[in-house]
Amino acid sequence: MGIKKVWFITGASKGLGLSLVNQLLKAGQYVAATSRNINDLITAVNSNSEKFLPLAVNLGNELNVEQAINSTVAQFGKIDIVINNAGYGIGGSIEELTDEETRNSFDVNVFGTLNVIRKSLPYLRGQRSGHIINISSIAGINGATGWAIYSATKAAVIALSEVLAEDVKSFGIKVTVVAPGAFRTSFLTTESLVLAKNPIEEYEDVRAVHARYLKMDGAQIGDPEKAAAAMISLASMPNPPIHLLLGNDALQRATAKTDALTKEFKDWKAITISTDFD
Ligand SMILES: NC(=O)c1ccc[n+]([C@@H]2O[C@H](COP(=O)([O-])OP(=O)(O)OC[C@H]3O[C@@H](n4cnc5c(N)ncnc54)[C@H](OP(=O)(O)O)[C@@H]3O)[C@@H](O)[C@H]2O)c1
């Protein structure tokens, strides 16, 4: 990798975030990384490089996020690439998940991402450069049974990224939203994944799908090191994509969704176009 850049990465004590931090430090880049638990992060990264800034951050707390962004700029002079990576899966039908369980997932997956964007943009706008990379999921494009809330949070990340890309284009800031398929991280472990505390017996299909996903832990098709490398490569592209799928499974599910949408729009066209004033 050529020029030294400053990266700000959330949720870095494990999984994709940790792979990103390790690869970037190895490449001599400047990396500020956040975690809920700074000791876990320091232990996981195991680096005493002065180019590494570990930060304890509660992403749902806007002031906390602002302090982390300010510390990064104070330490490294600027921020070039922001990666909103922190997030977790939440399983359960809408009826089974409480308001609190639902809101907690939006706090991390959506509002945390918004806090980081809101607090880093003044710097990126001032520089007239930067790249915001938001990690969504294939679930945000084509959700599966039993994961409605997770899909909703990740669909929100896609929607906000698409419009953000337009809003900040004239400032020279790029935006990419990444939709990974299944990757072999801690995502499906009890450490990360949250399942409804109050399951309802009748939701048999939901339970069956969850059992299938849990069984997949450790055998996911996606290699997190390759995903991290692909995300890092975005930063040196003059024209990076707004949407990037990662994994064959993601490509298949996204294509199935776009095909189904196209067919449904076409099948119901008569009613769709019947509602305009004559
Ligand atoms: N692996 C997959 O199959 C897959 C597929 C599609 C999308 N994704 C997305 O990719 C991103 C990274 O996930 P991963 O696969 O690397 O999973 P992971 O190994 O579980 O790591 C997730 C990271 O997000 C943070 N995080 C997890 N739960 C959190 C919570 N309740 N509050 C705040 N932060 C939390 C953690 O940060 P700290 O513990 O350091 O605070 C952790 O380092 C997530 O946004 C996830 O939704 C993953």
Image (cartoon, rainbow, N blue to C red):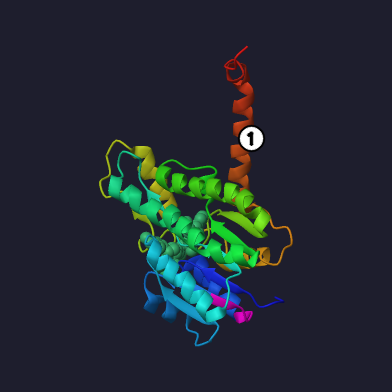
Residue pointed to by mark 1? 259
Magenta region includes residue 77: no
**Can you say which quadrant of the picture contains the C terminus?**
top right
Could you tell whether 14 is left or right of 259 in the image?
Answer: left
Question: Is 23 drawn above or below residue 218 in the view shown?
Answer: below
**Residue 13 seen from this side:** no
Query: Residue sitting at 52 percent across and 53 percent down?
Result: 136
Query: Residue sitting at 53 percent across and 70 percent down?
Result: 8
From the viewer's side, name the closer residue of 6 and 181: 6
Question: Is 261 drawn above or below residue 187 in the view shown?
Answer: above
Q: In which quarter of the image is residue 54?
A: bottom left
Residue at the far top: name it.
Answer: 278
> Which x, y percent locates residue 271?
58, 17
**Dividing the image into four equal quarters, which quarter contains ligand 1?**
bottom left
**Residue 181 seen from this side:** yes
Near mark 1 (Cα within 10 A), the count class, few <14, some 14-19 or many ≥20, is few
Query: Residue sitting at 45 percent across and 44 percent down?
Result: 152
Q: Give the range drawn in magenta.
A: 26-31
Question: Is 3 drawn above or below residue 194 in the view shown?
Answer: below
From the viewer's side, name the closer residue of 204 and 258: 258
From the viewer's side, name the closer residue of 210 and 15: 15
Provide the secondary structure element on which disc 1 rests: helix
| Residue type at numbered disc 1 | Asp
**Can you say which quadrant of the picture contains the N terminus?**
bottom right
From the viewer's side, name the closer residue of 169 and 162: 169
> Which x, y percent locates residue 218?
47, 62
Could you tell whether 27 is left or right of 216 in the image?
Answer: right
> Which x, y percent locates residue 57?
39, 69
> Which x, y percent locates residue 217?
45, 59
Q: In which quarter of the image is residue 34?
A: bottom left
